[in-house]
């Protein structure tokens, strides 16, 4: 059994929950080694909170975007000597490794390699390290992630190392039961402990609640479940809506599993491309209504596994080099202005699914099939990763 060190951004930091499916279901012949230190990981919330506070102000964000890559570069060089014993390969979770050893790196988009700061600050250094013999593979999660690499770096010398490996979720072994009398709409901001603060807004929670206000007037058999941190003023506004249930705390997966199993439609008018939320919904045989922003169109097959609606006309979603602007001050201000056209289209597409049980079932089954047999299946992901790992370790 060969051992792969799954290295987080910082020593002992808690890995995002999207890596669970990788750690617990590795390719055949491999196992992952993870280093955990609660004293260090507990500081992660503080750092993310500070980051959220800083990026709200343009006067702070400009230097911070330049300082962050440099600070992270220094940190990575300082932790160069740290590595568990008896591991064969390092799998770097969205960051560069400077050690002279075989390693691969995954990433959401090009900005991840510079701690989501200004790419040009470390552009030449990143290019040099990616060209090194130690770097064996660069695996973006989506085609859009790959595109951001090609547009932001001179990839000569490592273009052949770039290969898309989609995120994947395990199949759910259950038989879907459909409730014709009452239809539950589900929105999940995040199931992860970190980054809960802005998830409601970024993932489209405001649009979901606005849309439901219209839908509940048209249909009497609806329920909306919101699993997300929700701002206090929003909770107060909808407190008397008996058909809205807000779960504003992180809950055990067993409880969230029940909400997914008993839902009929998954609403996700997000202003970003999620790591796992859409895939989780499809694994539970749910048709998905999502915004067609950045890489969402790679996850949702419009008209087959759900519906895609246009993103907000008020929002600039990515820059000229296909790097998402998620978290930028202007982006955050823009998404807080709910676009009525997005809400109208969300109501329109959701209404189609509410009125057509057969379509809900067929789209749900098609989505579940993509998770169990398609590009987002554990088996397809592991086929790719096994080949990548094997080739990285060839002498």
Image (tube, rainbow, N blue to C red):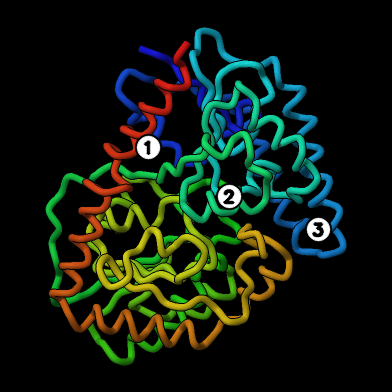
User: Which label was assigned to residue 250?
Assistant: none
The image shows residue 126 at horizontal and vertical percentages of: 71, 36
Q: Is residue 97 left or right of residue 89?
A: right
Choose between 269 and 255: the one closer to the eye. Answer: 269
Q: Is residue 332 left or right of residue 339?
A: right
Determine crowd level at label 2: few under 14, some 14-19, many 20+ residues with C-alpha closer than 10 A: many
Q: Which residue is denoted by mark 1 in the rendering?
A: 21
User: Which label was assigned to residue 109?
Assistant: 2
Q: Residue at x 61, y 27 (%)?
A: 12
SS type, badge 3: helix
Q: Is residue 326 left or right of residue 366?
A: right
From this view, report whether residue 20 is shown above or below residue 293.
Answer: above
Task: Give the mark toward the camera: 1 or 2.
Answer: 2
From this view, report whether residue 306 is shown above or below residue 139.
Answer: below
Q: Residue at x 38, y 73 (%)?
A: 308
Compare marks 2 and 3 and give the one earlier in the sequence.
Answer: 3
Compare marks 1 and 2 and give the one earlier in the sequence.
Answer: 1
Choose between 247 and 191: the one closer to the eye. Answer: 191
Compare marks 1 and 3 and give the one earlier in the sequence.
Answer: 1
Quadrant where the N terminus sits is top left
Q: Which residue is denoted by mark 3 in the rendering?
A: 61
SS type, badge 1: helix
Choose between 242 and 128: the one closer to the eye. Answer: 128
The image shows residue 104 at horizontal and vertical percentages of: 53, 29
Q: Are marks 1 and 2 in contact (CB under 8 Å)?
A: no
SS type, badge 2: loop
Q: Residue at x 27, y 37 (%)?
A: 379
Q: Give the distance between the C-alpha atoms of the residues marked 1 and 2, in whole angstroms.
A: 20 Å
The image shows residue 386 at horizontal and vertical percentages of: 36, 27
């Amino acid at each position: 059994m060969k051992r792969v060190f799954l290295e987080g951004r910082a020593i002992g930091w808690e890995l995002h929950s999207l890596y669970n499916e990788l750690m617990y279901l590795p390719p055949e012949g491999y196992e992952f080694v993870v280093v955990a230190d609660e004293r260090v990981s507990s500081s992660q919330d503080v750092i993310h909170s500070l980051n959220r506070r800083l990026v709200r102000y343009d006067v702070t964000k400009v230097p911070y975007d330049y300082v962050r890559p440099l600070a992270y570069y220094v940190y990575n060089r300082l932790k160069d000597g740290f590595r568990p014993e008896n591991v064969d390969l390092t799998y770097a979770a969205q960051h560069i490794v400077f050690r002279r050893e075989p390693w691969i790196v995954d990433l959401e988009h090009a900005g991840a390699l510079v701690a989501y700061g200004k790419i040009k600050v470390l552009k030449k250094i990143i290019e040099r390290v990616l060209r090194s013999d130690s770097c064996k593979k660069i695996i973006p999660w989506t085609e859009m992630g790959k595109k951001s690499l090609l547009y932001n770096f001179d990839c000569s010398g490592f273009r052949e190392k770039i290969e898309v490996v989609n995120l994947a979720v395990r199949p759910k072994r259950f038989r879907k039961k459909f409730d014709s009398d009452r239809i539950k709409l589900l929105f999940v901001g995040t199931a992860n402990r970190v980054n809960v603060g802005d998830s409601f807004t970024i993932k489209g929670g405001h649009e979901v609640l606005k849309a439901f206000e219209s839908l509940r007037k048209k249909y009497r058999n609806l329920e909306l479940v919101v699993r997300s941190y929700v701002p206090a003023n929003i909770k107060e506004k909808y407190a008397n809506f008996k058909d809205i249930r807000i779960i504003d705390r992180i809950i055990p997966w067993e409880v969230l599993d029940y909400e997914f199993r008993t839902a009929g439609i998954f609403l996700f008018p997000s202003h970003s491309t999620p790591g796992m939320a859409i895939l989780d919904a499809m694994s539970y045989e749910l048709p998905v209504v999502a915004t067609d922003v950045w890489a969402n169109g790679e996850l949702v097959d419009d008209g087959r596994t759900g519906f895609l609606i246009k993103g907000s006309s008020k929002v600039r979603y990515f820059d000229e080099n296909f790097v998402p602007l998620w978290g930028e001050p202007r982006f955050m201000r823009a998404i807080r202005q709910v676009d009525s056209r997005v809400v109208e289209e969300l109501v329109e597409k959701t209404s189609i699914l509410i009125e057509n049980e057969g379509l809900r079932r067929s789209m749900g089954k098609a989505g579940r099939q993509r998770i169990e047999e398609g590009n987002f299946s554990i088996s397809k992901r592991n086929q790719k990763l096994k080949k990548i790992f094997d080739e990285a370790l060839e002498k």
